[in-house]
Amino acid sequence: PARCSAGGVCYIADAPLCATSKVWDEAREALENVFGRYSIASLAAAEREERGAAHEAAPAGR
């Protein structure tokens, strides 16, 4: 099988783009229809901020 640009394995060798990219696009579009176009990026940014704050608040390792 061909190597997928996303790091996986693409099982459709003659596809113009990796099949997984189509799956991700369809999933993104479905989520955007439910949550709104920009909320996915906003949720990801908020998650990164929370993880950063939690990491800074954690005691330093030995």
Image (cartoon, grey):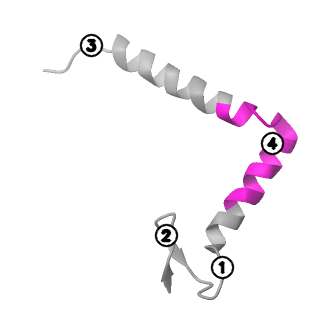
Amino acid, disc 2: Gly
x then y, percent, for residue 42: 67, 28
As measured in the structure, the alpha-carbon distance from the residue carrying label 4 to the one carrying label 2 is: 24 Å
- Tell me which residue sits at (22%, 16%) in the image: 60
Instruction: Indicate which disc residue 1 carries.
Output: none
CB atoms of marks 3 and 1 within 8 Å: no
Q: Quadrant of the C terminus?
A: top left
- Tell me which residue sits at (51%, 63%) in the image: 6
Q: Of the residues tagged 2 and 3, which is closer to the observer?
A: 2
Query: Dominant secondary structure of the magenta stretch?
Result: helix
As measured in the structure, the alpha-carbon distance from the residue carrying label 3 to the one carrying label 1 is: 49 Å
Q: Of the residues tagged 2 and 1, which is closer to the observer?
A: 1
Label 1 neighbour load within 10 Å: few <14, some 14-19, many 20+: few
Q: Of the residues tagged 3 and 4, which is closer to the observer?
A: 4
| First-in-chain label (2 vs 1) | 2
> According to the image, label 4 marks what residue?
32
| First-in-chain label (4 vs 2) | 2
x then y, percent, for residue 38: 75, 33
As measured in the structure, the alpha-carbon distance from the residue carrying label 2 to the one carrying label 3 is: 37 Å
Q: Which residues are magenta?
A: 24-41
In the image, is residue 13 above or below residue 52? below
As measured in the structure, the alpha-carbon distance from the residue carrying label 1 to the one carrying label 4 is: 25 Å
Amino acid, disc 3: Pro
Label 4 neighbour load within 10 Å: few <14, some 14-19, many 20+: some
x then y, percent, for residue 3: 47, 77
As measured in the structure, the alpha-carbon distance from the residue carrying label 3 to the one carrying label 4 is: 37 Å
Q: Of the residues tagged 1 and 4, which is closer to the observer?
A: 1
CB atoms of marks 1 and 4 within 8 Å: no
> According to the image, label 3 marks what residue?
59
> According to the image, label 1 marks what residue?
16
